[in-house]
Image (cartoon, rainbow, N blue to C red):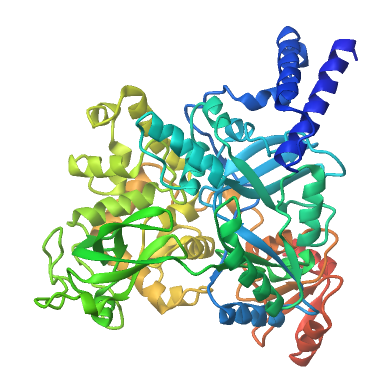
Amino acid sequence: MSNIQEHIEALRSELRTHNHNYYVLDSATISDYDFDIKLKELQELEAKHPEFFDANSPSQRVGGTVTKNFETIKHAYRMYSLENSYSKEDLLDWETRIEKLIDGDVQFTCELKYDGASISLTYEHGKLIKAVTRGDGFQGDNVTANVKTIKSVPLQLKGDYPETFDIRGEIVLPFDGFNKMNEDRIEIGEEPYRNPRNTASGSLKLQDSAEVAKRPLECLLYNLTGTNLGVTSQFESLEKAREWGFKVPEVAKLANSIDEVLEFINYWDIHRHNLPFETDGVVVKVNDLQQQEELGFTSKAPRWAMAYKFKAEQVSTRLNSITYQVGRTGAITPVANLEPVELAGTTVKRASLHNADQIERLDIRVSDMVYVEKGGEIIPKILGVDLSERPENSKPTEYITHCPECNTLLERKEGEAQHYCPNYNGCNPQIIGRIQHYISRKAMDIDGLGGETVALLVNEGLITNYSDLYELTKEQVIPLERMAEKSAEKLIEGIEQSKNIPFERVLFALGIRYVGETVAKKLARHYKSIDAIREATQEQLENVDEIGIKIAESVCLFFTSEENNETINRLKSFGVQLEMSAEELVGKTILLQGQSIVVTGVFETISRNELKKLIEDNGGKVSSSISSKTSFIVAGDKMGPSKKEKAEKLNIDLITEAEFLQMVSMG
């Protein structure tokens, strides 16, 4: 190593240390002036010697990279949402569910839930490789250039960090920095930003990273994700992350019971107002990582974590009018249009009234003063009416009888809360909504085509259903509002690329009522093709694992429509994937079809997730708890004694990891 290279490396190391002390430990060890002098020296040396360039050098934090389009990246490990709770009873119910599924004492880690923009950072050999937004949980946007400008994000780790791992956290904007940004905006005559959370989230999508570098963003980390991490508990992982150089809040606490969890919650419900950041609750996690693995996940959230939300802010305001929206399924949603009011940092103008029963139950009327709350501090809802303020000439609300868009007589099936417009193929919002669902990220993920463009295409008469998308030409879309030649080319290319989307996502994209992502996956894997599904009887569909009467009825009803079958046939003719590909079918059998299997303990040859995938690939169902319906248990080391006792009592077979692997390999 040359003297110049050694000097550059020494400067980088020194600046990283000062940076960590100031932005992570809040303890400056050098003056700002001296830091700037050393940084300038480093920048000059790097400019003269580009052969020693390092993407993770402290000099790169000033930004300067311009990103026109943020690349979409699939998360190696899904970023789940958390189940919410609002009371002691919710937490006790959660604790009871946990105790039924795992053996032994349970400790909990309590952490504050910071209100920012979720981020996943990937490190390899101690260096930051990429930063990806949460997106839909499965995939997000690559915002690495912007995140590198955040001083509390380490670009180079220290200590005994794993070779490769992801770490999740929140990008937040402290109140002081937010207020200073707004003072500067007001001074130059600009509108102030509404709240720190939205400003932090918007900062990550700025095209010029030099602009992001000017914003006082911080990154608070809370979760390690990956394999061979060298930790056994959540609390230990927080301590380790802190040692490696991450900014991990010190307030986390270990609790031995829900009562101790509630002590933490009650303390911070009062003291959160003294924090420098926004926080809207507490996240409670089962501390032991082995127990977390045992508990696993539902289709939406980990079973081992719960978010306790602090009581939402409430205000009262005037209800000016009630309007009605038509969804893609024809469902009618009444909307309260309110006198604008500040609530939890945002201006609220509208709130959902849900359905006719809700309006009748609360006796909500136009001109009432109503109490508004942000449910979980996200979606505004009306809690009740201030009857003392009700005008004398007030009249009860009469729910509409006809569709507000196409004037078709509304229907309301017995046992259902909502009214529906039955004009499936002639009601514009339904048509637009179905196509918007079809192109959405979790479905066909058509790049270059957004919801507004779909509405334009329908309103201009260019498309009437999602199969029409595949006949669009560049010449047809260029005249649309805000559509240039490059945008048109991207749109047509995105539609063409969607022909490669796998069958299970296409099935979800079709928008069959009650067929969400999980159900679509079950049906696709069971029937393998759209033709097999549409030929299935209701009784046959009901026999598929987790497909009930309501779903089976809806699927059959969808395929009784001549228009729907014609659309499916057109999609097929355009080359859309309406059956599982040969690659997808490799390794998939019906060996375990109809069997419910519990996986428990610690495994040596393959991971628990790989075991579960093998079960599903061979037609089986993975169950989290032992019952009389359990077919057998794949038992690893450290299987809990109460589980073993229950299995013996129910006479359920226990097989080893090796026996299971032999079983599926022979199948």
For this view, does 636 lie left or right of residue 173? Answer: right
Q: Whole-percent x and y of residue 594?
A: 60, 76
Q: Whole-percent x and y of residue 111?
A: 67, 61
- Vertical side of 143 occupied by 51: above or below: above
Can residue 626 be spotted in the picture? yes
Image-quadrant location for residue 98: bottom right
Q: Whole-percent x and y of residue 498?
A: 43, 41
For this view, does 234 lie left or right of residue 475? Answer: right
For this view, does 366 lie left or right of residue 161? Answer: left
Q: Residue at x 38, y 28 (%)?
A: 188
Can residue 55 be spotted in the picture? no
- Vertical side of 446 occupied by 44: above or below: above
Decide which of 26, 614 is in the foreground and name it. Answer: 26
Image-quadrant location for residue 37: top right
Q: Residue at x 55, y 40 (%)?
A: 177
In which quadrant of the rendered image does the C terminus lie?
A: bottom right
**Residue placed furthest toward the bottom:** 649
Decide which of 513, 103 is in the foreground and name it. Answer: 103
Q: Residue at x 36, y 33 (%)?
A: 190
**Count of residue discs:** 0
Decide which of 289, 506 is in the foreground and name it. Answer: 289
For this view, does 457 lie left or right of residue 595? Answer: left
Q: Residue at x 73, y 42 (%)?
A: 26
**Residue placed furthest toward the left:** 393
